[in-house]
Amino acid sequence: KGKQKKPADPSAPLPPPPLPSVTGCADALRHFGPLRDDMSPPKRPSELTLLKKSVQQLYREAHSHIVLEKEAQELVVDLRGKVQALQEAFHSLSEVVVQEVDALRAHASRLDEDMKRLRADVRVVAELKQQVGTLTRSCELIP
């Protein structure tokens, strides 16, 4: 009976506030009504959730990068095939051009020989014409 309370030390930390009782929360819910989704406070994602999202994002980026690399590789293979086909076509065309040039050279050589023969023939015809003219005059002189 004779206990007296000691005065509180002003430098001592304050005790934590008492936790609300479950009954107090239930009373508050009845008073304010149930919480709606748009009124609920935003939840802060946990570190594990953030790590999972980061890993998923890295996976998606890596997958996209791999897909792009595969597409680029396919394009390179396709381009190599086209370049090889073009090289083969160029080689074939160059062979045809060389053959055509050789044929034209041979044809030009034959034409040159023909021209030389024609010039020789023209000289022979000119000589024959001259001889015919001489014979014609000689025949006119014979009575």
Image (spheres, rainbow, N blue to C red):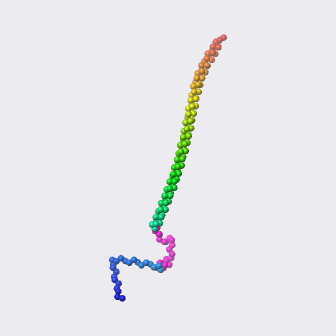
Q: Which residue is at 36% across, 76% downward?
A: 13
Residue 120 sits in quarter: top right
Q: Which residue is at 55% across, 44% downward?
A: 85
Q: Quadrant of the N terminus?
A: bottom left
Residue 139 x/y as whole percent: 64, 14
Say left or right for 60 vs 125.
Answer: left
Residue 8 sits in quarter: bottom left
Q: Quadrant of the C terminus?
A: top right
Q: Which residue is at 55% across, 34% downward?
A: 101
Q: Nearer the viewer, residue 65 or 116?
A: 65
Q: Is residue 80 magenta?
A: no
Q: Nearer the viewer, residue 93 or 127?
A: 93
Residue 26 x/y as whole percent: 49, 78
Q: Which residue is at 50% across, 58% downward?
A: 63
Give the magenta part as a residue range.
Answer: 24-45
Check the image and report above or below for 97 versus 37. Answer: above
Residue 121 x/y as whole percent: 60, 23
The number of discs equals 0
Check the image and report above or below for 41 versus 93. Answer: below
Check the image and report above or below for 132 versus 85. Answer: above
Residue extending farthest bottom: 1
Residue 31 x/y as whole percent: 49, 78
Residue extending farthest top: 143
Q: Is residue 26 magenta?
A: yes
